[in-house]
Image (tube, helix red, strand yellow):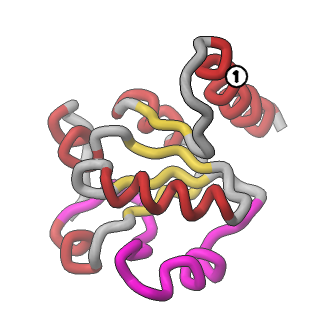
Amino acid sequence: MKKLFQIITFCLSAIIIPACAGKADTKFTNLSADEFERLIDDSEVQCVDVRTATEYSEEHIAGSLNINVLDQHFLDDAEKQLEHNRPVAVYCRSGRRSRNAAERLSERGYTVFNLDKGFEGWKDAGKNTEK
């Protein structure tokens, strides 16, 4: 229960603070590698690699699901594999595809967080990966 409260507090902070700063309203939240790592450390958060299966098989963040945003069935696949009541953390190679995925998932009602500089930024920050 305490973990759930922390997630909700984090989610609300991520939404309210940028709004107070006068930033444009987005439907998802961009996170740095450090913020993303703290978020996905919580087992309630669903981490999704939106790159191709080939990219995923070469190297990825441990524990992440692979749902290719370029696949025409992306949203259908996401609906089958993800739970609406749990936050979703998405990433791709550089952040471009995951922003697309974050936008589309948030339109479907998911609470979404995007790894701002993607998997490359994750590795540049010295974060752990899995092959």
Q: Main secondary structure of the magenta part?
A: loop
Image height of 103 relative to 36, above or below: below
> Quick one: quadrant of the N terminus?
top right
Secondary structure beneath dot 1 equals helix
Task: Residue lying at the far top in this picture: please name it.
Answer: 21
Q: Which residues are magenta?
A: 59-84
118 on left or right of 63: left
Q: Position of residue 111 (x, y in %)?
A: 67, 50
Left or right: residue 126 compared with residue 78: left
Residue closer to the observer: 115 or 63: 115
**Residue drawn at the location 70% of the way across and 55% of the way down:** 86
Residue at the spot x=20%, y=78% of the render? Answer: 54
- The magenta stretch spans residue 64: yes
In this view, 11 is above or below 85 = above
- Which residue is under mark 1? 16
Q: Position of residue 72 (x, y in %)?
A: 44, 87
Between 102 and 122, which is closer to the camera in this rendering? 102
Name the residue rendered at 34%, 60% in the picture: 97
Q: Position of residue 66 (x, y in %)?
A: 40, 72
The residue sitting at 77% across, 39% down in the picture is 4
Question: Is 74 on the left or on the right of 105, as rendered?
Answer: left
The image quadrant of residue 9 is: top right
* Quadrant in the picture for residue 122: top left
Type of amino acid at the residue the image marks with label 1: Ile
